[in-house]
Amino acid sequence: MKIIRAKDYKDMSRKAANIISAQVIMKPNCVLGLATGSSPVGTYAQLIDWYNKGDIDFSEVTTINLDEYRGLPREHDQSYWYFMHKNFFDSVNVQPDRIHVPDGSNPDAEAACREYDAIIRNAGGIDLQLLGIGHDGHIGFNEPGQAFELGTHCVDLTKETIEANKRFFNGDESLVPRQAYTMGIKTIMQARKVLMVASGADKAEIIKKAFFGPVTPTVPASILQMHPDFILVGDEAALSLI
Ligand code: GLP
């Protein structure tokens, strides 16, 4: 595990974008596993800036997102499909047929997850997986207690996650979907490189628990301690307890 200390959110975003950019330069047809949430937004903004300056080219890159709410159509302004287009894809040259997000509109959970695992397999696995971290240690939507050996699967969101995400649904908890399709821990662990971004004092406690506590399914991110190439880029506030 490598920990990189950044000054603030902007510095964290630039450092993370540098690592992604190096991956794309070294392997232009790489497979990037991407994440949603507020943590990686600055990373995407930095990559867009470098793309606009001609410093990075995504034309051969394949992207595979971590998760999607079950029951939300792509066009819903809170779907992760929509989030990714607004914050990244609409501003760079990733080819539309190389963009993958689990199909939240497919009510057949088993089929949706099976198809997604096939996409990941056919792409040759993930070269670099970008991650944020939830306050309870979830990665993607792998909530505490999920088995480490799962591929893409359907999860029930915890109360805490629903509460944390209601700010995106007009503050109305009843509008937050109760389930999601998520890449499993197994798939995340199979990524050749894993890059986590963490920012803010509210993440300090979970960062300490996940990376300096025991490896346990009750803190899903803790398994990353075992990954051979895991990089955590955190700002001062998020790393303040370690
Ligand atoms: C959601 C996403 C996660 C993300 C987490 C933290 O639950 N499914 O992938 O890491 O939120 O989000 P934030 O970065 O906004 O704190």
Image (cartoon, grey):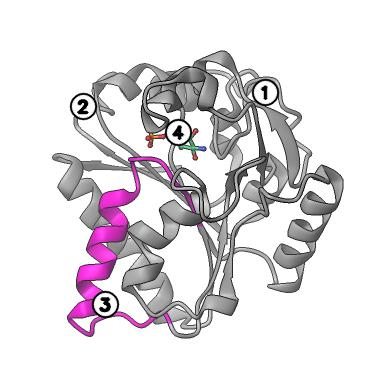
Please give the residue where the numbered disc 2 appears in the rendered image: 237
- The residue type indicated by label 4 comes to Ile
Crowd rating for badge 3 (residues with CA inside 10 Å; few <14, some 14–19, many 20+): some
The quadrant of the picture showing ligand 1 is top left
Return the disc, 4 or 2, that comes first in the chain's sequence.
4
Q: Is residue 107 above or below residue 214?
A: below
Please give the residue where the numbered disc 4 appears in the rendered image: 133
- The residue type indicated by label 1 comes to Pro
Q: CA distance from mark 4 to mark 2?
A: 14 Å
- The C terminus is located in which quarter? top left
Please give the residue where the numbered disc 1 appears in the rendered image: 217
Q: Is residue 45 above or below residue 174?
A: below
Image x and y of residue 175, in percent: 52, 26
Instruction: Say left or right for 176 vs 19.
Output: right
Image x and y of residue 49, in percent: 20, 70
Q: Is mark 4 within 8 Å of ligand 1?
A: yes
